[in-house]
Amino acid sequence: MNKTLILVLTIFCLTEVAGQKKNFPQDPQDAKFETSDIQNFWKAFDSIQYANGNPFETYIKNGTIGLQGFIPNRIISADSLLNMVKRRKQDYEKIRGIEIKIKEQEKRIKPYFYALEYWYPNAVYPPVYFVVGRFNSGGTSSENGLLIGAEKLTSLDHLPELVIHESIHFQQKWPKGGKTNLLQQSILEGMADFIAELATGIKGNQEASKYGNEHKKELCREFAERMYRDDTQDWLYGTSGKDNRPNDLGYWIGYEIVKTYFDKADNKKLAVDHILNIEDYDRFLKESGYLEKYIK
């Protein structure tokens, strides 16, 4: 999986919309991939030389609700976007025609939504908006759906598992109180990886998984000491460089906790429901038994 894109998406997804199911479609067939913003971007892009004023004003004005959600802290304004396009015109050109490839990928992804429905009949399917920004965000999420910065999609090979992974965040029940500690965030990420794997058959974050399994004892001890803190450094969203660990170890250990819980369950579909609707993370960890010998 494209870890950089997953990382950026997930930071915002967890802080802004996790657990908000809104009135999204419950039929996988109704899941929507919206690429009209990409088409509008190229209209503006190709008119820069002869337009009166900034053509990206029209791009923003006519944008989808997804594009509107991508403006704060990312696109910022039409002028900011125009300046970036002038600086990186050749980089933007590399994704010309990508909306056609995205539509082709949609055909690959829809069956995975049906697989998700099998495991979790209460699933909802938020729209996926593909927009074009300023190369400063692979994507984010809003209450209106998943937003992906198309200019960052140098490859579409991992798009299916990316979309499914992020869709899982819309199914999750958010911890009470709004704040999370390292344990909760790791389980939230780990369950997204785990259930996405159930639906797609594709294992994400393989680098973190390999490193985590090779250094399991010392990492479990470290995690057990830190899991109730809100400091996620060296586990989620960046490392300090104290060793050669990859960025996503919180995903790995969260995945392992969730997988252990799932493997012990007699009713697997009910286990998925419990995983997505955790009320008490301490109890969930205890029931999994994963860190039992590392907790003092």
Image: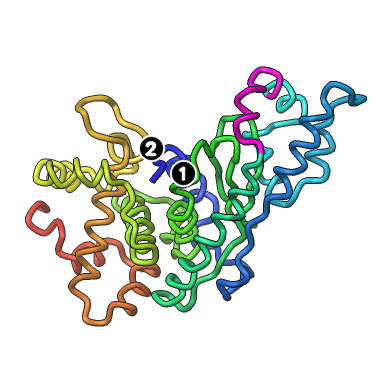
Among numbered discs 2 and 1, the one appearing first in the sequence: 1
Residue sitting at 61 percent across and 35 percent down?
A: 95
Is 262 positioned to the left or the right of 157 in the image? left
Q: Which residues are magenta?
A: 85-96
Of all residues, the one furthest to the right in this rendering is 52
Asked whether 65 falls inside the magenta stretch, the response is no
Q: Nearer the viewer, residue 174 or 121?
A: 121
Residue sitting at 33 percent across and 51 percent down?
A: 204
Q: Nearer the viewer, residue 186 or 168?
A: 168
Determine which quarter of the picture holds residue 248. Answer: top left
Q: Give x and y (percent) for residue 227.
A: 25, 47
Asked whether 93 falls inside the magenta stretch, the response is yes
Find out whether the residues at labels 2 and 1 contact each other: C-beta distance under 8 Å.
Answer: yes
Amino acid on which disc 1 is placed? Ile
Q: Give x and y (percent) for residue 132.
A: 66, 38
Q: Determine which residue is flagged by label 2.
A: 237
Determine which quarter of the picture holds residue 259. Answer: bottom left
Residue sitting at 83 percent across and 42 percent down?
A: 61
Q: Determine which residue is flagged by label 1.
A: 11
In the rendered view, would you say 204 is above or below 136? Answer: below
Disc 1 secondary structure class: helix
Of all residues, the one furthest to the bottom in this rendering is 267
Per the model, the C-alpha gap separating discs 2 and 1 is 8 Å
Determine which quarter of the picture holds residue 271. Answer: bottom left
**How would you classify the magenta stretch by its main secondary structure?**
helix
